[in-house]
Amino acid sequence: MNIHEYQAKALLKSYGAPVAAGVAIFKAEEAEAAAKQLPGPVYVVKSQIHAGGRGKGKFKELAPDAKGGVRVVKTIEEVVTNAKEMLGNTLVTKQTGPAGKQVNRLYIEDGASIARELYLSILVDRSVGRVAFVVSTEGGMDIETVAEETPEKIVTVAIDPDAGVTAEDSARLSDALELEGVARGQASMLFPLLYKAFIEKDMSLLEINPLVVLTDGNIRVLDAKLSIDGNAMFRHPELLELRDLTEEDDKEIEASKYDLAYVALDGNIGCMVNGAGLAMATMDIIKLYGAEPANFLDVGGGASKEKVTAAFKIITADPAVKGILVNIFGGIMKCDVIAEGVLAAVTEVGLKVPLVVRLEGTNVELGKKIISESGLNVIPADNLDDAAQKIVAAVKGS
């Protein structure tokens, strides 16, 4: 689960991280009062969407030369003017795709006198099986660009889970960021508290870009991107309250109600599969034969008829879907349950696109019998390769 920048900063501040004063607003009429709560004389008006690259983004409804989604202004009047212009409009960035995201919240923050911009993130480094810091002196830039053009400027420090962030770890990170004096001392305190927040809140990513050194030598968390492991949300009801459903795909929201692993994609072939590995293989082979999957959908190993029905309805609710591939290898999941779920869903919502079904495993003959006797226009498949070729051909009208 992702949360907004202002929410992430509030969480980090509760752990002791240095963040600027700021106020979140939801209506343009709140902008003046919000700005008056800040020291000034410089203010930053920040769009709050779940996507990076806001500063370089463009609003669909505004002129091409209009400012982006993060604006630095010097008067309260300018705060109000920019708030009116930004709220309710659609911001397009590299990470939103061409559709963009509507800006429903702004964060009015006190300005900063910046001497240096640095990059810092914490993530799970699967190559070593530990949580690791990733830092660079090239803050404010896309880390992917830095990795491509100057990879030597990125330093990774894996943390021993038994020891936590040690003095040696802090020294390595400070050296990599070329910190000295006051900033170095503050960083030595910042690194452990960020790690503590990451572990205690079950984060999957904490990115601070940029972490800045101010002209007075102090450091500040100028931006914060935070993702929490969805599988750990039961431990954090207080964080679940921060969820912004307007930032999520409606189909993914519906899938979460049934504990379905669903991710919307840009293709036109809907997939219903059991098991994440098989789902990935199914998407890969669809691409191999020249088409694109419309979703990742794993119904799990022990799905009920109701769960399968819900999954099928979610797939058919996507107007981009021009064909559906059901690929089930029955172990714990029984093929007859899948067949009954598909029939129930088709009966309820109808079947307007080609449907290819490949069943194998537990109760496979019963599952095939249920579908064959249903009267549905279903295309049977013998194996995954056969299924992929048939659904791609059906969608292309062959």
Image: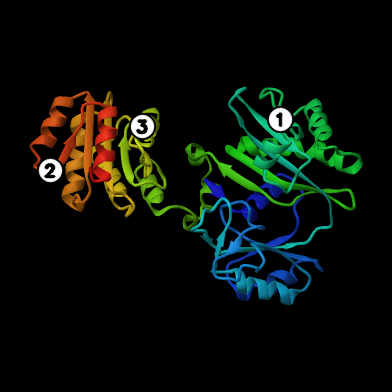
Res. 214 mark? none
Farthest residue toward the right?
Answer: 181
Label 2 vs label 1, nearer the camera: 2
Query: Is 169 placed above or below 219 here?
Result: above
Label 3 vs label 1, nearer the camera: 3
Which element carries disc 3, helix, strand or loop?
helix
Q: CA distance from mark 2 to mark 1?
A: 55 Å
Amino acid at circle 3: Ile
How busy is the neighbourhood of tag 3: few (under 14 within 10 Å), some, or many (20 plus)? some
Quarter where residue 133 is shown:
top right
Q: Earlier in the sequence, mark 2 or mark 1?
A: 1
Give coordinates of residue 195: x percent, y percent. 69, 35
Residue at x 17% of width, y 42% of height: 343
Q: Which residue is mark 1?
A: 156
Residue 84 shows in this picture: yes
Res. 376 mark? 2
Amino acid at circle 1: Thr
Residue at x 75% of width, y 38% of height: 136
Residue at x 74% of width, y 59% of height: 21
